[in-house]
Amino acid sequence: MVVGMTRPCLLASLVDLAVQMQRDADRPEAELHRRDRALVRPLEGGASSHRELLMAWLEGLRAGGEAMPGRSFSAACRVLVLSLAVLGLAIGWGAAAALFFYDGTRPVNVVHVLAVFVAGQWLLLLLLGIVMIPDRWARWIPGAGAVQETLALLSPGQLVRLAIRFVPRSARDRLAGTVASGAGNLLQFKKVWKWAVIFASQSFAVGFNAGALAACLYLVTFSDLAFSWSTTLEPDVEVVHRLTQTLSAPWSRWAPDAAPSADLIRETLYYRQTRPLSGAAPERWGQWWPFLAACMIVYGLVPRMVLLGLAGWRLHGSARRAFIEAPGVAVVLDRLTSEWVTTQAANPESKSPDRSGAVLEALEGSSLADGSPLCLVNWGGIEMSDEMLASRVGESWNRRIASVRHAGGRASIESDGRVIADIAAATGEPGVAVLVKSWEPPILEVIDFLRELRQAIGPGRILIIAPVALDPAGGLAPPRDADLGQWRKRLRSLGDPALVVRGWQEGETP
């Protein structure tokens, strides 16, 4: 079965995913689980990957009436990129028309053309190369981070305002608002945003170089241009000849006419004078154009087209990774791939005052519901015996509890380290659930513990954080929504795709 025959692009779906996870952050877990399982149950067996399942989930939400900004953002981005390309085309044409301007009195200076369309291009490419340095490498290069931050201020974001002016007035405000809203959601995916900005900048650069080349060929074809080179310093024909030979090396064998000879360089050396050009046949003054056009193609247009393709490829790849690695995606996948686990008591009036079985709701719906063992960590000294906790969790969730360990609170750093080492060395690679006091904020101590635990157990094992409260009788109780939201918000910043924060819902005690 093919899932989602017609879907928005991956970038649009990424924006929708970020928006939907924000909307769901404060909704009851039971409501979300029932809604999501109803959406994907008809598709079971049809999704070949988690990415396909998430795409089908978003499509189901759209069909159900959820307002999603991703498609509008994607369409706005296409308009924006096209506008940047048109803007670059116009600016490139204008720049070339100014540099190739010839009124019959003073010839076109070859040096100026090379300075703008070769030297200037490669200076910008050098700066772009600094921006493209991965963050993990930039921190080892002195000054690279500062340069990247400075160059970010010169990003095409400044050109976006100018490009939007090319859009009809009736759609201008709506386009600006859509782009700003979508970009705000996309900023949390740093690599995706980085390559999106580079793609936009290269769209402008390709347009600029294409416009400049078009203007050059147009003026050469439909006007009579004269070229020369000049300098206030002592002219050295041999040095200039070596420079042009170096620049024309990529094409000199198959296009010898596009490589200036020493005689052409000598004869087109220009000195200030009040009379018409002399000293060479008039047609010689126009023989520079093949060299200049080749330089604009090889050193301007081609590198930008290559970078545009590279940026598009990396943008797609980073979006694909971000789609399944984004913080909070593991929670969504848990709901989509597992049945809702409830063990409602047959006689509610006979509830035990000890509600320790409610902790299972903190673990409901996890992808660990395959019967594999589970390690429990009692963080901060929750008042409950290990035997009671292991018994209630094991019976209610129908799984074996590999161990119950204690960390945080009065435990020393060395003791916490031993707990992490023991869990990492556990046979069978069981999942880990950390029970925390919901009313206590997620302080740095627990954050450091979770980071070290994740580093020790690796990225493949799920890590569940279960904030719990205590009732007057000392049993476990569901956390307040505000407390649960605080834990979710703080732990989402860790960027751990396999970390799950679970809260128990009132009225569904095991």
Image (cartoon, rainbow, N blue to C red):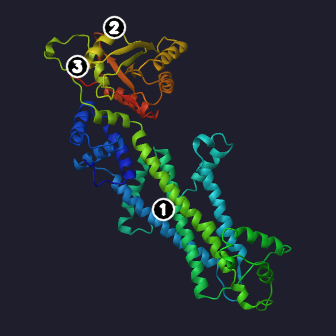
Apparent side of residue 74 relative to residue 128 in the rendered image (left or right): left
* Picture layout, residue 343 above or below residue 47: above
Apparent side of residue 212 relative to residue 454 in the rendered image (left or right): right
Q: Amino acid at mark 3?
A: Thr
* Picture layout, residue 90 above or below residue 157: below
Q: Earlier in the sequence, mark 3 or mark 2?
A: 2
Single out the residue that lies furthest toward the front.
253
The one nearer the camera, 263 or 355, is 263
Determine whether the residue tagged by mark 2 lies in a helix, strand or loop. Answer: helix
Q: CA distance from mark 3 to mark 2?
A: 19 Å
User: Whole-percent x and y of residue 395?
Assistant: 26, 14
Question: Disc 3 vs disc 2: which is toward the camera?
Answer: 2
Q: Amino acid at mark 2?
A: Glu
Answer with the quarter of the image where residue 388 lies. top left
**Disc 3 marks which residue?**
509
User: Whole-percent x and y of residue 227?
Assistant: 71, 82
Query: Does the residue at mark 2 contact the one at mark 1 (Cβ under 8 Å)?
Result: no
Q: CA distance from mark 2 to mark 1?
A: 64 Å
**Residue in the image at 42% along x and 27% along y:** 461
**Residue in the image at 50% along x and 15% along y:** 416
**Mark linked to residue 387:** 2
Disc 3 crowd rating (10 Å Cα; few below 14, some 14-19, many 20+) is many
* Picture layout, residue 415 above or below residue 481: above
Q: Amino acid at mark 1?
A: Arg
**Mark linked to residue 193:** none
**Disc 1 marks which residue?**
161
